[in-house]
Amino acid sequence: MFQAVHLASNMQSVPPNDECNPLSYVKSVLQLVCTAASPIPVLMLITVVALRHGFSTPLHPLVKIAGLSLLALNVAAFGSDKRWMLSGPMLVFVTLIGVSLIGLSHAASFPPVGWIISGAGVVASLLNLGAVTRRIGLLRTTSLLLLGLALGVYAESMYWRSGGEHLIVYPEAMLAGQVHADVLMEADMVNMIGTYGISSTGLDGPVPMKYHTGSLWVALALQRLCGFRALDFIAFGYGLLLVPLYVAGIFGCAATLRAVIQGAKENSMPVSFWIVCAVATVGLFPFMTDPNHWNFNETILNSDSFLFALGLSLWLIAIAGTFYISLLGTTQTLTLAQKLGFILALPLALALIGFVKISQIYLLLTLMLYLCWRVKWLRAWPVLLGVALSALVAVVQLRAETGAGAASFAPLNFDRIHPEWVPYFFIVYFIWAWLFLFLWARVQHVRNLSDLLLAILSGESIPVELVFAAVIAGIVPYLLIDFNSPAWKFFTEFQAVFAGVFVAAFIPRIELSKLVAGLRSGQMSLAEAFGLLLAIALCGHLFMTTEGSAYRMVKSIGEARAGIMGKSPLEWRSQLRQINASPSPWDPGVVARSNVLLCLESLGRQPPALERTSALYIPKTNRLYWDMRQVGVGATPFIAPAESGMAMVDGLPEFEDIGWAAIGWGYPEYKLPSGPEPPAIQVQQAVSKARQNGFQVLWVFRGLNPAGCDLEEIALN
């Protein structure tokens, strides 16, 4: 990775005739960023196909989502260098919205539409690759692609890591009881949105669950457009878009902020910029399981909604940067289009991000409010009106959110981390913010409190103030609310990404030729020597962290395959050696569970009109289904809606399988059993509930019989 970053550092990123145009500078750097990010969806496609060998793999849908991802990434390279409204970051935002709307429309039912969009992505990536190669040469372009591959290996392996959450073989790992409920719950909600138009898990009728579901609406659109099953798309398809969008967002946002700070004074991106962006993507610390979760990327890369919301937020901040650049050298008087942008576009953009993740509209709105307080010209009535409307949107979304997990008011509750870590938490957890403060002080020559006060009064400290505003805004919910889950990280970890892109924007240029000359002559200063040693150690860290995450991903695949074959997880290496051979006979119990899933999947093949009027009831006496327990408690009930695409009645978990689920995964929306209950067939109760919910057909799935599926269809009219 270090060699790739070193080669990329000397790229000519601004054409000579555009040296004084910061927007042109942004466009030229975004072309490099898009080139570096483009190998990621291709790598992820190859990884899925290779590691799923022997299992049924939806190859054509995977190719479509990879092409769509290339389109979303590479449109940034074709942005305008004259108008911020047509800049690269804006085109990314508009493309995602446009493709999602197409996926939700009737056009998604025509397979050629998905292929056309995917083909457009391939063409856009090749055009950008050709333009970059002509400008900077083949060797430096190759270094960009190598950098993208290195980051892709790390990001994909953290996304499909061990632990039963996101797994490349998730649908098959269910048969061995090795998954958690997250992917199943999201697949349920995608199915319920698609079938009934209601955001729900559908365990006991389509009970609405009004919480941030924007990522699931987009998932439904892309699933339709590409031709996936909901479960397959959430398990191993969605990441082909989300992961590269987030990685490119870090580099693209940092490049835009650097253009804001540096103008177009640079004629090439320094090596330090690429290194810092790479570290911001990988994380300062290795993957750790202690309560601090030092490597904030671990949480980001394991939550689809969080990953999507942060990616959108980074591109939105980049749009704000291009808007600011467009005002440079003007009287900063807002035009009619800019006024309408603040009044209408700002609330709409923040509403979309809040729809994806409620924490992000809160954090971005906090930054906007702080900017209005600190920057005088922003206190114009169109800006204030747009911010007020955005605040109203945030309040409405917060009031409408019932949440997927329980929360309570618990001020200064530090039980969520080990007590001995409390004194160090605010130093270690917010290390990126402290690093940015020290870097900014050195670059701006702020040596004492008097210099700091002058910087605050002059407004030069606003970048640092914004970072610490994000720190404070994120830590308030952490200190005051007990989420009964790691959900507090969705508020506190944004500051690390935000500070990381600012570090990349401010990092001074490192002249490698001078360092090499100083090393040869022995005239290198101690500070430079220490920095060089630190850089070498950092590169070693990047390599080992990437290697470790890739190892965990491959190991999880081997363990799942061993479980499916009825063998010990310790034999995972032997299963990987057989990955290219004919599949071994499955364990008989696994075969029976597989047949249960095939029965459920067959119910989902009904015409949409019939599926919308049907519900499913699985009596607790069907032990083949209800004993399909997973490593994550509360997961079993989600299997049927994920496979069949229809809602259940009386499909809540058994008391023994509730566990933590009582306060998460949308279970607070239902009346859960308060104690153990003997398995029973309650068909009449299920019929009554199905009628109350307006269903016309109830399918009763009692299990398997010699003829296959023991299914009974009951007409409710």
Image: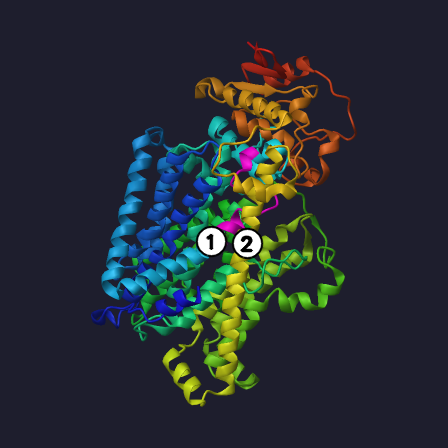
Rendering coords of residue 371 (x, y %): 47, 65
Question: SS class of the residue under badge 1?
Answer: helix
Mark pair 2, 1: CA separation: 8 Å
Q: Which residue carries the number 2 mark?
A: 549
The part of the chain drawn in magenta is 153-172
Residue at (38% x, 43% y) in the render: 66
Name the kind of residue labelled 2 in the image: Ser
Quarter of the figure with the C terminus: top right
> Looking at the image, can residue 656 be seen?
yes
Image coords of residue 272 (percent x, y):
43, 72
Q: Residue 45 or 212: which is nearer the viewer? A: 45
Question: Residue 403 is drawn in which quadrant?
Answer: top right
The local secondary structure at tag 2 comes to helix
Number of marks drawn: 2
Could you tell me which quadrant the N terminus lies in? bottom left
Q: In this image, 155 relative to 573: left or right?
A: left
Which residue shows up at 58% across the image and 36% down it?
Answer: 173
Residue bearing mark 1: 153
Which residue is pictured at 39% across the width and 78% down the height?
512
* Mark before the other along the chain sequence, 2 or 1: 1
User: Which residue is located at x 51 percent, y 26 percent?
Assistant: 645
Q: Is residue 398 left or right of residue 407?
A: left
